[in-house]
Image (cartoon, rainbow, N blue to C red):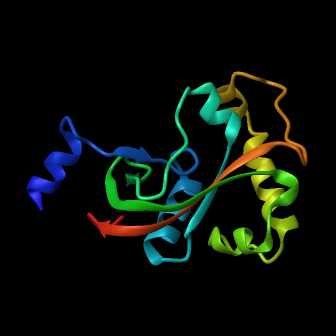
Amino acid sequence: MADRLSAMTGPHALKPFLLAFPGPLRDRLVAAVLSGEKVATTGLLAEYEVEAEELPEPGERSALIDSDGREVAVVEVTEVQVLPLGEVPLALALDEGEGYLSVAEWREAHEGFWHSAEMREALGDPAFVVDDSTMLVVERFRVAERLQEG
């Protein structure tokens, strides 16, 4: 185990799999991933563009990071889809593992996050708002390995 952990923090480290911002929301999301309830996550395509980051690909592995910055699991991407906000299916809302029972509930929570001051600052746009045409990146994933209890 020590060799594997040192490899993760060495020159071949896995890139971080970050859910939300550190704090209570990230803690809930990490717990949902570790319990198997959360098998999908959705981000803004604009985030990838602002950070000049390539989209993830199936088979790619990342280190799930908790609010304390610890690597708690290795997650493997199983599917990546880019779609407009107006086409989010109920299956995605359910697979996000946050207890949403409808796309409307899912969208309300996500819009609140995407319209937050932290997200607007990260995007460099204090007036950022989403609409049905806003492009999203949906990642489906599985826990490939637990590294420590989160």
Seen in the picture, residue 58 relative to 90 is either above or below; the reply is above
Query: In the displayed structure, does residue 143 sit left or right of residue 116?
Result: left
Q: Quadrant of the N terminus?
A: bottom left
Q: Residue at x 26, y 42 (%)?
A: 13
Q: Nearer the viewer, residue 78 or 38?
A: 78
Q: Residue at the location (63% across, 26% down)?
A: 50
The percent position of residue 135, horizontal first and vertical second, equals 77, 44
Number of numbered tags placed on the structure image: 0
- Observer-nearest of 19 and 75: 75
Q: Position of residue 52 (x, y in %)?
A: 55, 26
Q: Quadrant of residue 145?
A: bottom left
Measuring from the top left, give residue 93's x and y in whole percent.
Answer: 73, 69
Report x, y in % for residue 7: 16, 47
Say whether residue 48 is left or right of residue 133: left
Residue drawn where x is 61% and y is 59% of the image: 41
Q: In the displayed structure, would residue 71 be above or below residue 143?
A: above
Relative horizontal placement of residue 149, taking residue 48 as reference (left or right):
left
Q: Residue at x 59, y 64 (%)?
A: 40
Taking the view exactly as shown, the residue that stands out farthest to the left is 3
Question: Which is more toward the observer, 141 or 148?
Answer: 141
Name the image quarter holding the C terminus. Answer: bottom left
